[in-house]
Image (tube, helix red, strand yellow):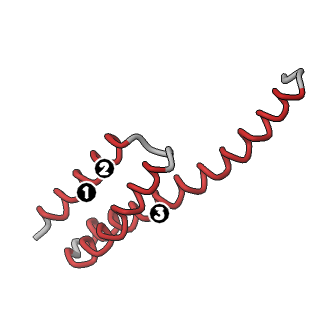
Amino acid sequence: MANTSSAKKNVRKMERKTAVNMARRSRVRTFLRRVEDALAAGDKTDANAALKLAEPEVMRAVSRGVYHKNTAARKISRLSSRCKALG
């Protein structure tokens, strides 16, 4: 438990940052789920359209520090290769 006033302030700051990061992570997951749903349905045009929307969202999360850049690159790469294989 935090004893000093600065430690208590840091706890409050972390709670706010955690809430923001959780919202950002949830938003990215929503975009990725749309791509997954389109891939599962076998709809190539929907999958490509969803991927075009998901990619900048994932990279935005990287720039905000929610994801590591290699993790984002791996996710985008795997999804794009699956969209490409759909045919």
Residue 9 versus residue 49: which sits nearer the camera? 9
Pointer 1 local density, CA inside 10 Å: few below 14, some 14–19, many at least 20: many
The residue labelled by disc 3 is: 30
Q: Are marks 2 and 3 in contact (CB under 8 Å)?
A: no
Query: In the rendering, at what x and y percent does residue 60 appear?
Result: 44, 57
The residues tagged by marks 2 and 3 sit, at their Cα atoms, a distance apart of 14 Å
**75 in relation to 42, above or below:** above
Quarter of the figure with the N terminus: top right
Residue 86 image position (x, y, % from top left): 14, 66
Q: Amino acid at mark 3?
A: Thr
Measure the C-alpha gap from mark 3 to mark 1: 14 Å
Who comes first in sequence, dot 2 or dot 3? 3
Do the CB atoms of the residues marked 1 and 2 lie less than 8 Å apart? yes
Q: CA distance from mark 1 to mark 2?
A: 6 Å
Q: SS for tag 1?
A: helix
Could you tell whether 14 is left or right of 72 in the image?
right
Secondary element type, mark 3 = helix
Which SS class for mark 2?
Answer: helix
Q: Residue at x 29, y 47 (%)?
A: 73
Identify the residue shown where x is 28% and y is 66%.
Answer: 40
What residue sits 30% from the left and 49% below the top? 75
Image location (x, y in percent) of residue 48 = 24, 72
- Rendered position, 83 above or below 45: above
- In this rendered view, identify the residue nearer to me: 80 or 87: 80
Image quadrant occupied by the C terminus: bottom left
Query: Which amino acid lies under the numbered mark 2 shown in the image of this protein?
Result: Lys
**Residue carrying label 1:** 79
Give percent across and percent down for residue 22: 60, 50
Q: Which residue is mark 2?
A: 75
